[in-house]
Image (cartoon, coloured by chain):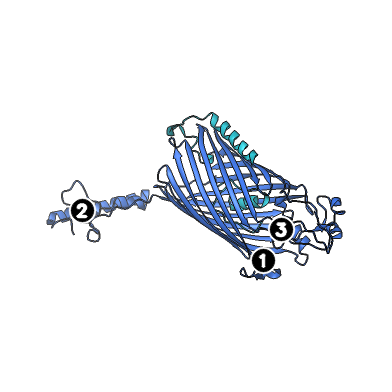
Amino acid sequence: MQLTTRRPPHAIRRRSALHTAAKAFAVCVAILTGASEARASDPAVPDQTHTVRPERPDAKASPIEEPTLEDTTTKRAGFEFGAYQDTDNVKVITPSINVSVENVSGGSLSASYLVDVVSAASIDIVSSASTRAGWGEVRHAGAVSGQYKPHDFGVSVGGSVSSEPDYVSYGGYAMIVKEFDDKNWTLTLGYGYSHDTAGRCGIGGACTPFDVFSRPLERGAFNGGLAWVVNRDTLASVTFDLIIENGDQSKPYRYIAMFSPTVAPTVKPGASIDFVNANRLPEKPLEALPVTRDRLAVTGGIAHRFDGSTLRVDERIYDDSWGLKASSTDVKWLIDLGEHFLVWPHVRFHVQTQTDFWQLAYVSQPAPAFTLPRYRTGDRELGPLWTIDGGFGFRWRLAHEPDAPAWRIGLTADVMYTSFLDDLYLSNRTAYLGALQLETEW
Amino acid sequence: MRIVVLATGLFTLLAGAGCAHVAPYERGKLAEPTMTADDLDGPAAAHALATHEGATGGGSLSESGCGCN
């Protein structure tokens, strides 16, 4: 529908003169300030001082301007490239991507995908599979999650999948969040479940089908947390994790050296492959672990804001039904360097006891007696150890126009030293970990 | 197990002892992203920690396991 009625001839002449003048003005403005401002001086904009409105060129196409809906979502996308190498000849590169979108109404969706490319010729592989000079594997992992928290109550759900040639895992979780006392207290409760299937692959990557050989592992994780405002500068939190695992977690590749009762006491921590092979019994059975494991962890955290920096300290106390007890202390000091830079030195210390069934040298009677211990392992993470991890992180928030995407570049670098206190073959390990991150938000 | 319960109780008592109600307009420092940012370490660092330590917990529920330990 046309908004104007028929115009008299003098009005048309006046419109033509106005049009010409406005056009000349628009050209000048365009030269001085750019095309965008020139558009604002377009003669098509009605002259409010005149009773006869000029006809808009696009009046027939859209006589009434449609109201545009404002986009209230914030979208993010990130990429990380991580690289790991240690003195036990293990190398891992981990490229990953993540995307998320969140709305001002409290809804958000996120997804991530990563690839682990592992190559290893560690002492464990060399000592138990001499025909394989090295080993390589690729793992794919993806996760999606959604959250809706319009006010002081929210729910979040998610799922994840991880796949490698001899191991598949999928899981899901649900969590609720409730804030109390004007958001001075926040309670979270959640439950997660995952189902893993472990298989076996041979030399050259040929794998036994899962329906021929597989070991299932089910894991249920109850999680509860409480975070509270201590004062104007300090937040505190405590989190409980109860994880119940059912299934055979022993590795089908891990063979355990056995010793006679007279030789076992002579085996020292860090004994070489040559020493072990010269003194062990001929039999070398596979690893055997208990088929249930209950794990409990309590993590406390404090975050304190100073002028220009934030100190964060987390302490995790851990205990499980296999007898492993551990303490992990993590300290980060995040320092603002101006408006765009953030740097954080980081230190983490972890110490743990051995599991009840851990032994440096397992004892067996020679054949034909074969009195193998019921449980036996060579998994170093089940033995006594301590690890100290030191490093730093750096983040650069690039300057941007108000309506343009924001970009962020991050870099982290860590050195991790582990002392194995009662292990064959290896007494310590130094690992180097670096990651480069690129993120954008619009 | 007893040590876990004791540590929890002690931490909660210590941290909660000086708690005061803080109004929303007094939370300028608490709103600083570094106070709660949980994205400082990416998946590569999380994976490295998971394979270096026999303990678990204190992290996300959303991760699936791997046979990499």
Residue ranking furthest to the front: A369
Mark 3 and mark 2 lie on one chain; the one further toward the N terminus is 2
Depth check, front residue: A395 or B35: B35
* Amino acid type at image mark 3: Ala
Depth check, front residue: B56 or A398: B56
C-alpha span from label 3 to label 2: 95 Å
Q: Secondary structure at mark 1?
A: strand
Q: At x 64% / y 49%, what residue is drawn?
A: B49
The chain to which mark 1 is attached is A
> Mark 3 and 2 residues: CB-CB less than 8 Å, in contact?
no
Q: Which residue is mark 1?
A: A200
Q: Which residue is mark 2?
A: A17
Q: Which chain does cyan denote in the image?
A: B
Figure check: B50 above or below A213: above
The chain to which mark 3 is attached is A
Viewer-nearest of labels 1 and 3? 3
Image mark for residue A288: 3
C-alpha span from label 2 to label 1: 86 Å
Viewer-nearest of labels 2 and 1? 1
* Residue A165: % across, % down: 63, 65
Residue A49 horizontal side relative to residue A286, left or right: left
Mark 2 and mark 1 lie on one chain; the one further toward the N terminus is 2
**Chain A display color:** blue
